[in-house]
Image (cartoon, grey):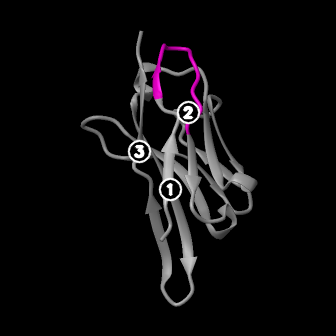
Amino acid sequence: QVQLVESGGGLVQPGGSLRPSCAASRSIFSFLVMGWYRQAPGKQRELVAAITAGNTTTYADSVKGRFTISTDNAKNTVYLQMNSLKPEDTAVYYCNGKRYILGTGTREYWGQGTQVTVSS
């Protein structure tokens, strides 16, 4: 069974930085794409950033230039470097991974989420 475990959320002041991480129980190379989503109270879950197996990245317009997604393949870990944080970045951040399973198709996995709160 594939597991994704996030850590590194917390409380930070506006303009500050955080770097949550997502540790996978399988090799990062086994995922087609890994990403970070977030969900604020009363809002739908939205894609924040994603990285493919070929290292192509994509970002939500609201975080471009402030957030960076990266991987450490040796540690099977995905990071989200968040700089210049704003109160509107406050949300639960979820790690997501998609794998192709021969004979089954694409399967999606989610972490349990980590809270990020930006407040003075």
Residue displayed at 64% across by 50% down: 77
Counting from the top left corner in percent of width and height, residue 100 is at 56, 77
Using the rendered view, name the quadrant where residue 79 is placed: top right
Question: What whole-number distance in Å separates the C-alpha atoms at marks 3 and 2?
Answer: 19 Å
Specify the amino acid type for callout 2: Val
Write down the region rendered in magenta: 10-20
**Farthest left residue in view:** 42
Left or right of residue 117: residue 29? right
Residue displayed at 44% across by 53% down: 111
**Farthest top residue in view:** 120
Residue 113 disc label = 3
Circle 3 crowding by C-alpha within 10 Å: few under 14, some 14–19, many from 20: many
Circle 2 residue: 63
Circle 2 crowding by C-alpha within 10 Å: few under 14, some 14–19, many from 20: some
Specify the amino acid type for callout 1: Leu
Counting from the top left corner in percent of width and height, residue 118 is at 43, 20
Quadrant location, the C terminus? top left
Circle 1 residue: 4
Q: Is residue 1 on the magenta stretch?
A: no
Disc nearer the start of the sequence (1/3): 1
Identify whether 98 is placed above or below 37. below
**Viewer-closest of 65 and 84:** 84
Residue displayed at 50% across by 82% down: 105
